[in-house]
Image (spheres, coloured by chain):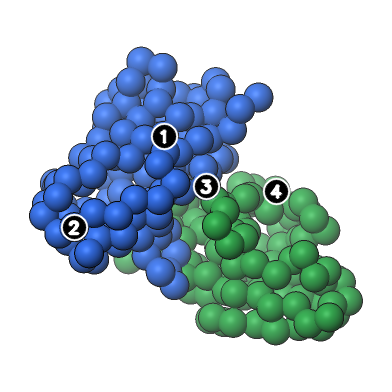
Chain colours: A blue, B green
Amino acid sequence: ETGVTQSPTHLIKTRGQQVTLRCSSQSGHNTVSWYQQALGQGPQFIFQYYREEENGRGNFPPRFSGLQFPNYSSELNVNALELDDSALYLCASSLPTGLAGNEQFFGPGTRLTVL
Amino acid sequence: AQSVTQPDIHITVSEGASLELRCNYSYGATPYLFWYVQSPGQGLQLLLKYFSGDTLVQGIKGFEAEFKRSQSSFNLRKPSVHWSDAAEYFCAVASQGTYKYIFGTGTRLKVLA
């Protein structure tokens, strides 16, 4: 069974650019959540996708957007990058229903640096 | 507002000593509670979770946690720490019927040989 994978591992961008991060969910999981983990902080919930629809969103501006594909993989897009967007971005997948009671399995993350 | 507090930013223990990491939460209803561990360069790994029932929960790697509703706490314990336990530990809560996990700021554990 393949776990949650994310790509790329590391990424360096400059202010104002756009970035796309990718996540493949664990087999059998149709729910994907994205989190931002700034240095020295806990992960902050960005949004969740369930059956290709956004299922909830945290306190992040609209320039953070996402997609989920029929195979349940997902993308996180960030437009107009700011220095404060530098962080580890974590993807987590979970079993069907999309409810918090289901354990979320985390990928290794993508480290984004904005210069 | 819903929140999770991990009062200890850093903890240092000697190998073989006991460990307790504190977690307090603020939540309206009975929450789902989790402890995750994160090693450098790694994602989060679930140690244990509490949904309902027995308030003492056993997890992987010899960890356990106790849910105390009266104190709004979910402290993580291990009777004898191993050097490989050095990592960052996160407590998280989620409301029943929702999708959103709220994480604490983490406790970094250092283990002395």
Kind of residue at disc 1: Cys
- Going by the numbered disc 2, the residue's amino acid type is Thr
Q: Which mark is residue B96?
A: none
| Label of residue A14 in the image | 2
Disc 2 is placed on an element classified as loop
What type is the residue that disc 3 sits on?
Pro
Q: Residues within 10 Å of mark 1 (few under 14, many from 20)?
A: many
Which residue was labeled with disc 4? Answer: B53
Residue in the picture at 11% in, 55% down: A16
- The answer to whether dots 1 and 3 both sit on one chain is yes
Residue wearing tag 3 = A108
Do tags 2 and 4 sit on the same chain? no
In the visual, does B30 lie left or right of A72? right
Query: On screen, A71 above or below B62?
Result: above
In the displayed structure image, the side of residue A80 where residue A89 appears, left or right: right
| Chain for numbered disc 4 | B
Q: Chain of mark 1?
A: A
Q: Which residue is mark 1?
A: A23
The answer for how far apart the CA atoms under marks 1 and 3 are is 10 Å
Q: CA distance from mark 1 to mark 2?
A: 22 Å
- In the image, what residue type sits under mark 4? Gly
